[in-house]
Image (tube, helix red, strand yellow):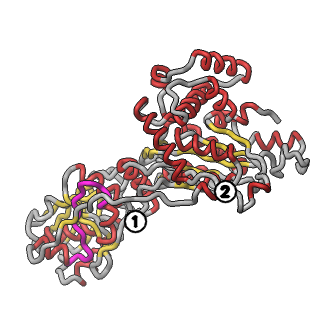
Amino acid sequence: MSLAIVRTRASCGLAAPVVTVEVHLSNGLPSFSIVGLPETVVRESRERVRSALLTSGYNFPARRITVNLAPADLPKEGGRFDLPIALGILEASDQLPVRCLNALECVGELGLGGELRPIQGALVLSRAVSQEERTLVLPAANVEEALLVAGAKVLSVSHLTELTAHLSGRRVLPYTRPEPSRTFSITGPDMADVRGQYLGRRALELAAAGGHHLLLVGPPGCGKTMLAQRLPGLLPLMTEEEALESAATFASSAGGVNPDLWQNRPFRTPHHGVSAVALVGGGAKALPGEVSLAHHGILFLDEFCEFDKRVLDQLREPLEQGSITISRARRTVRYPSRFQLVAAMNPCPCGYYGDPSGRCRCTAQRVTRYMDRISGPLIDRIDLQIYLGPVDSAALNPKIPCGESSSTVRCRVKHARAAQYSRFGEINARVAIDVLEKRCQLNPDAHQFLIESMRTLRFSARAYYRILRLARTIADLSASDYIEPQHITESIHYRYLDRVSV
């Protein structure tokens, strides 16, 4: 046989398109060429494959070898095509049984000695292959990650000779299937560590219960970062589908996934010097950014006003749409970005604007320039905007009992979210406007109060619906079927930057 066909897959964001590796042997001067839009690493597989076959005891055909990676217009990158190319050469040269690879999809990078090295994006591959109910051949180091997909059928291989022995019938490799569901626990700092800041604790609980975006404003040392770090401990574990989406996004760019923590929600904290490409994604290879790596989790931006204004404005579309599309000359990739934004900032450059002690020496113009670094449309998309004052020294007394623990607050959050899913099928922050208007039961007095507040405080239409969503969350935590005037009042109170002026 002079032609062999092996199925494998490429990597394109969260997609894993099928690639057919066609290996043809013909007469002529010995040569080895790879076609089908291969990048440098793929072209270099010629030397890796040759050495791996020879050191594994196989003959390398002294013929004209042509490898076609189809479809030809799909860019191919990485060392993942080494294994299917090697297997295609062995089958085409009659060193493997004919059509022994028909039911398999093979991915792996070869070492010069024939050992298989791990590749990136194994979870994405496993999801795609399992949907077609085929068997995936992977390096042993990637198997644990691939088995996170329910129903996946994986063949674990450490060396090329193990796989060839299995295909030739000399040895049987066991097929690996996912283990029964494991029990995961939520890890992280506890809310009991926070002393004072009752308004901050309340806002954190509301943010967790309804999935609302949160902005914490306050002087240095008042506990903004401490509070934000405890938000993941208030959120329920991700569902299996959410965990797969989040882990697949991370695996597509940053490597492997920790199977013991994969259902914990991501908590991303980029530095304020981050570039727009690093934040929303892009670059030559169209990789996901922080907004996508925080999918189904939290994106925490500390020192909010220190970020470049143009970089922050890139957040506006992902906040509304829950996804980001990156377009390049040769490809267009769409990444999910359904994250919860938590930001912290000082009220002025020195951090003490409005302090009763008079420590602030910033002029009104300087404070205005500082606050203008955040655009109005971005602030309008943040449901909870609160000011945190300095912590009272009396609250730091170790003899005073600590506040509620994260597990206690998480229990209330869980019940509030259950009511939201029962009513809307979604958490309050993500409910569509038409569904919100139809199913949100609003007390007539509360509606009238909201309309009057809109006129007085000049809120936008977007702010109107965000106030309504937050009021619905407040009502859910109170186990109230109707939104009452006090719920609207509290919701408006949390729009700090809309109510104050410098």
Please report contact status of discs 1 and 2: CB closer than 8 Å, yes or no: no
Work out whether residue 382 can be spotted: yes
Q: CA distance from mark 1 to mark 2?
A: 63 Å
Count residues near mark 2 (Cα–Cα under 10 Å), then give few for <14, some for 14-19, many for 20+.
few
Image mark for residue 40:
1
- The x, y position of residue 357, in whole percent, is 90, 49
- The span picked out in magenta is 147-161
Dividing the image into 4 quarters, which one contains the C terminus? Answer: top right
Q: Mark 1: few, some, or many residues within 10 Å (few <14, many ≥20)?
A: few
Q: Indicate the amino acid at tag 1.
A: Thr
Name the amino acid, label 2.
Answer: Pro
- Residue 401, which numbered label? 2
Seen in the picture, residue 218 relative to 316 is either above or below; the reply is below
- Decide: is 375 above or below 176: above
199 sits to left or right of 47: right
Depth-wise, is mark 1 or mark 2 nearer the camera?
2
* Quarter in which the N terminus is drawn: bottom left
**Residue 288 picture location, percent across and down:** 48, 52
Please say whether residue 150 is one of the residues in the magenta stretch.
yes
Question: Residue 408: which disc?
Answer: none
* Residue drawn 70% across the image and 18% down it: 455
Q: Secondary structure at mark 1?
A: helix
Would you say residue 107 sits in the magenta stretch?
A: no
For the point 66% across and 43% down, the residue is 215
The answer to whether residue 273 is visible is no
Q: Position of residue 253 (x, y in %)?
A: 45, 58
